[in-house]
Each structure stands twice: as C-alpha cells, then as structure tokens.
Image (spheres, rainbow, N blue to C red):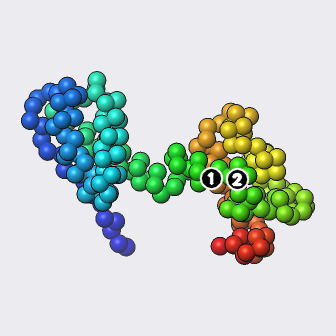
Amino acid sequence: MRKKKPGRKFHIPQPKQQTYDFTELYREYYKTMVKQFYSHLGNHEDAEDVAQDFFEKFLKYWKNIQWDKLTGLMAIVARNVKYDHLRKIKGRPDNVEMDNELEFECHDEGISDPIRLLVRNRSVDIVTEAAAVLEGQDRDIFMDFYFNSMASEEICEKYGIKKGKFYDCTHRIRRILRKKFKGRDFAPDGSWNQ
C-alpha cells in the first residue's frame, strides 16, 4: 500500500517581538504570507487574495493568541484558509461559487441541467417515476425545484434550510436520478449518461 504524501507545510519565520498589535503583525508577515501562499497556489493574484483572507481569519483569534505559539497558530490558519480557497475553486457544494454552478433558474431553458430538460420535455410518467425514487424532503425539493420551477432562495425559505444544504440535496438528487435512469438517454445530444 502506498503512503500518502503529507500536505505541504507553511514555514512561518519566528516573530521579532514578544507581542504585537494587529498592524505590526500585518506589516511584518504580509509579504511572507503572500510568498507562502504563492508557493502553494502558484498564482500571485490568488496568493494576495488568500493572504488577505488569512489576516481576516487570524483577526478572529486575536484575543485568544498565546504569543509563544504564534507561528503554529499562523500555520494552522494559513492551511485552513488555503484549503477553503481550493474548495472554492474546485466547485464543491460548500462554497459561494456554487451559486453560478448549480443554480439553474431557467436561464438556459434546461440546456446545462439535464434534470430540468427531462422535466420539461418528457412525460409526467417519467417525473412520477423519478419522484418515487426520492424520499421525504428530497422528493419535495425535487418537485419544487424542477417541476414547479421555484428559485433556490424560495425553497430554502420554504424548508428552513441554508443554501449549502440545498446544494447538497440537489447534488444527491441528481446522483440518485442519474443512477436510476442510467442507460436511458433523455438528452437529445446524448449527454445524459456522460
């Protein structure tokens, strides 16, 4: 069995002072953090953005900092901010970018969303078959989102859920229905089973 390579570490230089105010810490470490993030991400603009995010998150811990463990805390926050950024650019359901990725609010007449295409172009029997596979709230969200064309915000409000939960739910629905209808090509261009 192959060993997994550990993630790259952040190398934070030792502080020059015993304690800092936030401005002093920012001045001393900003360029260092940009260089560190650049070495991890390979893009200078992203590195600057993530460095800004790092200092914003780090400020949240300000009252609880143990100054003798400053560099360790900085490395942990840097790693977490880096992974948050990577999740965001990889299009995972727990990120803000998903609004553009998953929110098919009838803007493209179903071209990019095969479920919407299915609902619009095929019989009620197929929709009923799809709804029968789903359970509970998934079925209700499926019907509201695809059949009743409700916006994601309306659905979130109706069911008292956050957008992340809604995205998880729609992702699960798509996965279940793709499995259910595997081999049946509903898309005219053959893209359903890709």
User: Residue 62: x percent and y percent?
Assistant: 28, 27
- Toward the viewer: 128 or 28? 28
Q: Residue 102 carries which label?
A: 1
* Residue behind mark 2: 107
For this rendering, which residue is in front, 136 or 37? Answer: 37
What residue is drawn where x is 76% and y is 70%?
187
- Residue 84 drawn at (x, y percent): 41, 47
Q: Which residue is drawn at 23% across and 51% down?
A: 36
Give the foreground label among 2 and 1.
2
Q: Which of marks 2 and 1 is nearer the N terminus?
A: 1
* Quarter assignment of residue 17: top left
User: Residue 3 vs residue 181: left or right?
Assistant: left
Q: In this view, does 182 lie to the left or right of 97?
A: right
Q: Name which residue lies at 23% across and 28% down.
A: 22
Residue 170 picture location, percent across and down: 67, 51
**Amino acid type, callout 2:** His
Q: Is residue 106 left or right of residue 58?
A: right
Q: In this view, does 188 lie above or below 124?
A: below
Vertically, is 164 above or below 90? above
Q: What element carries label 1?
A: helix
